[in-house]
Image (cartoon, rainbow, N blue to C red):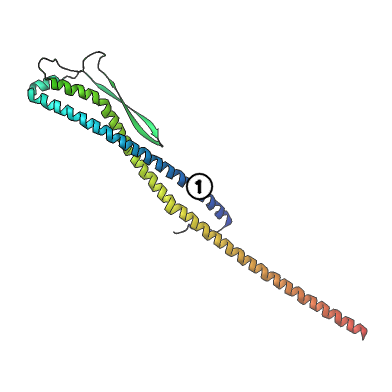
């Protein structure tokens, strides 16, 4: 792993140690977020699967009833029966926060007059299967809306999981090793400089001690010479 291109000083070493501590803490938080997102996503996927199977089964019943109705009614009768619907729907879109992800929440309000029938036709010239299909569609519409919100939430969580995974990998395999390698390099460089400084200081001390010994010897020799001159 290539180290960072920085000056090997104690100040830089201190800064890098702080950055490494932040990166390690951030790595842990991101891993915890990724794991929690995965748990939420798996729970949502299981719930989504059950709801989708329910919707598909009920839609199958609707299509079956509608097919039977189409076979016993003429196309013109079918078109006339469904031309002017009596019920409208106004969709509302909100949001909720799931692990820092704003996911949509869908709702709806029916514009049907209270107490009125959902069927836009009379029953004299229509099939009972058409009634069944329309009534069933009215019942499963809120479930379909919930399914749509769940699938959108699952897609958004999957995208967030992928982003978080890349960030975790970047910290784990790039940034943290870079910081650690650079800190080791600077520490080794500072230790080497310190050893070199100590060696130079030791040599200076030895030179000073040697000069002091030489001076002491010269003083002693001079003192002996003066003493010898006085005694002679």
Circle 1 Cα neighbour tier, 10 Å, few/some/many (<14 / 14–19 / ≥20): few
Taking the image as shown, residue 55 lies to the left or right of residue 42, namely left
Q: Residue at left 86%, top 79%?
A: 223
Vertical comparison of 202 with 52: above or below: below
Residue at the right extreme?
231
- Front-lying residue, 75 or 220: 75
Vertical comparison of 121 with 59: above or below: above
Q: Quadrant of residue 193?
A: bottom right
Say how many tags the image has: 1
- Front-lying residue, 171 or 4: 171
Taking the image as shown, residue 53 lies to the left or right of residue 7, namely left
Q: Quadrant of residue 147?
A: top left
- Front-lying residue, 93 or 58: 58
Quarter holding the N terminus? bottom left
> Can residue 6 be seen in this snapshot?
no
Give x and y (percent) for residue 213.
76, 75
Vertical comparison of 97 with 183: above or below: above
Q: Residue at left 86%, top 81%?
A: 224
Which residue carries the number 1 mark? 22
Taking the image as shown, residue 13 lies to the left or right of residue 109, namely right
| SS label for mark 1 | helix
Quarter holding the C terminus? bottom right
Q: Residue at left 47%, top 55%?
A: 178
> Can residue 17 be seen in this snapshot?
yes
- Front-lying residue, 12 or 146: 146
Give x and y (percent) for residue 209.
73, 72
Residue at the top extreme?
115
Give x and y (percent) for residue 43.
34, 37
């Amino acid at each position: 792993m290539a180290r960072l291109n920085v000056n090997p000083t104690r100040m830089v070493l201190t800064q890098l140690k702080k950055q490494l501590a932040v990166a390690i803490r951030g790595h842990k938080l991101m891993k915890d977020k990724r794991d929690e997102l995965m748990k939420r996503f798996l729970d949502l996927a299981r719930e989504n699967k059950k709801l989708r199977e329910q919707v598909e089964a009920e839609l199958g019943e609707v299509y079956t009833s509608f097919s039977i109705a189409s076979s016993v009614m003429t196309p013109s009768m079918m078109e006339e029966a469904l031309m002017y619907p009596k019920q409208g729907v106004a969709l509302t879109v909100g949001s909720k926060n799931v692990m820092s992800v704003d996911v949509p929440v869908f709702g709806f309000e029916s514009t049907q007059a209270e107490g009125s029938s959902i069927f836009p036709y009379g029953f004299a010239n229509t099939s009972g299967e058409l009634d069944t299909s329309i009534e069933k569609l009215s019942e499963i519409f809120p479930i379909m809306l919930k399914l749509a919100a769940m699938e959108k939430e699952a897609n958004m969580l999957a995208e967030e999981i992928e982003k978080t995974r890349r960030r975790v990998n970047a910290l784990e395999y790039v940034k943290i090793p870079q910081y650690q390698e650079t800190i080791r390099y600077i520490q080794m460089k500072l230790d080497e400089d310190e050893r070199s400084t100590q060696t130079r200081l030791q040599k200076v001390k030895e030179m000073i001690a040697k000069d002091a010994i030489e001076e002491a010897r010269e003083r002693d020799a001079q003192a002996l010479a003066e003493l010898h001159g006085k005694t002679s």
